[in-house]
Amino acid sequence: MASVTYGYGYKMFKYFNKTYALSEQTPPPDVKDAFSLFAEGADFMSADQLLRFLHEHQLELDYTAEDSNRVIETFMQSRTENAECDSDNNGLTLDEFFRFLFLVDFNDALKSKVHQDMNAPLSHYFIYTGHNSYLTGNQLSSDCSDVPIIKALQLGVRVIELDLWPNSTRDDIDVVHGRTLTAPVSLIQCLKSIKEYAFVKSEYPLIITLEDHLTPPLQAKVAEMVAQVFGDMLYYPETDLLTEFPTPESVKGRILISTKPPKEYLESKQFKDSDSERESTEELSPCIIPELEAAAAAAVAAAEKPNGNDLDEESLNARDKKPDQQGAPEYKRLITIHAGKPKGPVKDHLNVVGGVKRLSLSEQELERASTTYGSDIVRFTQKNIIRVYPKGTRVNSSNYRPHIGWIYGAQMVAFNMQGHGKSLWFMQGMFRSNGGCGYVKKPSFLIEQGPDDEVFDPKKPMPVQKTLTVKVYMGNGWSTDFSKTHFDAFSPPDFYTKVCIVGVPADNMNKKTRIIQDDWFPVWDEEFEFPLCVPELALLWIEVREYDKHEKDDFGGQSCLPISELRSGFRVVPLFDEKGEQLKSVKLLMRFQFK
């Protein structure tokens, strides 16, 4: 460490102050060695030598002489502005090279642009998917709004779910979590916000899944609204039932609708056993808070008696439905991805003959089905789409581990985007892949069959494919982003870093650095090795915590990175807060190597 520049004072035992020194970080030995090697022993690294470092050490073959010259010029300008000595020397000093490594534009851990093949069918991609996208909080009593929809779209979510119910007068459509105390928002408001924000983060197709509880006249009204609001953005399939889904590239900038065709919906016991209603009932399991359940039932009963008419739901549906009515044809024409949920054994619905479709399963249904016929699920997802949604007991909008779906090829692993925590961090980490466009190409072993028609089985023992070496050098930025007493009222923080692999069971592993006491600028300089059997599905999860002897360790930032996209060499890793938003200044300097 270099000389002390300033310090923080902390009050001890009410009457005494103790001052802790804050020190500047200096380049770790590995950085010094790399500088010496590529600068060929000189005190300055030229633009040509910097370019060689980027090509050979960082494996960044896309960088050009123009890029390295731009870096040198930036640091030379800084020298001139600060009246530093050697301002005329055309190269980087060791300290400048060290500062260069913290530049995200050059040394981010991930590529920032779309780089995967986007010309395969939609079923060949994991798709960033929201669950009950309109809810602001819990599943029972929070408000419904277009605000969480807007936020999800700004983060790159590509599947928005809307639950459609008749309004209190049954002449218009509300978006609401049915049979709960959630306050509705109008469908038209949601559609207008979707149109405005659909492609602000990603230009690739937006899919809207509709869980509708509507009569045919209201379905027709939905079709009219959707067509008027979206206009040319709306994609209409060329045929009633597709044999293959379109590619993300072919429907770039378009909005696709996924729901159950109205004829099948009407045949489901006059809506009583409809798929959308089945999911709603599952989500309101018997173990929800009894008081809320009773209040919700009372609210529904009141809503189902408009203008004093004592009609139950079946009577109301029958009133609006003629005996030979087959649903609204204009509504059916909207549907690109035909949806359904299994009635009876899941296996009966995993046949791959006929047109492509979307099958919805709860996390519990998927886990149960995968224990018996996981290979059938993988084979089904090679052409068709599976959507997984949270189990009904997650009334606080928590989430499940997304890998339970991904390892079987499930494309739409639907998450509560307001349910912050590890599971959502993993989801956000996966979809930092491919430039954050919301579509991640599935690995080939989930798309293709073997020579004997065999498919991937995540439960089978697998050999190690490669080993990832992670070195955690140091971190900084906490003293800028947090108050001096945020972590500890009496002393600087005691930071340590957890480094974990999240993937198939064989790859899961947790490691951590030692604790650095009383230091806002911790230097760990520790290395870890992770053997990986399925690196294509593995995530590197990094979390900094502040050790607390008497209470739960404090959160100091986290980041989740898809290992298949990790860039080798020295990398700066910005950390994110508990909501998944990037902290302004907090960063780690790390190194990644594969062998």
Image: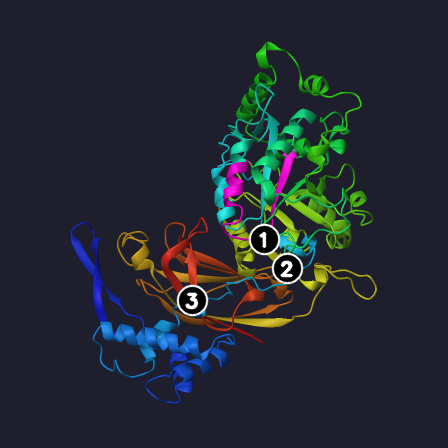
Neighbours of disc 2 within 10 Å: few (<14), some (14-19), many (20+): some
**520 inside magenta stretch:** no
**Which residue is the site of mark 2?**
118
Q: CA distance from mark 3 to mark 2?
A: 25 Å
Image x and y of residue 101, in percent = 40, 72
Q: Residue furthest left?
A: 15
Of residue 329 and residue 120, the one placed in the foreground of this image is: 329
Image x and y of residue 186, in percent = 53, 30
**Which residue is the site of mark 1?**
204
**Which residue is the site of mark 3?**
105
Q: Choose the circle earlier in sequence order: 3 or 1.
A: 3
Residue visible at 75% across and 62% down?
A: 448
- Magenta-colored span: 191-211
Number of numbered callouts drawn:
3
Q: Is residue 175 above or below residue 246?
A: above
Residue visible at 62% across and 61% down?
A: 537
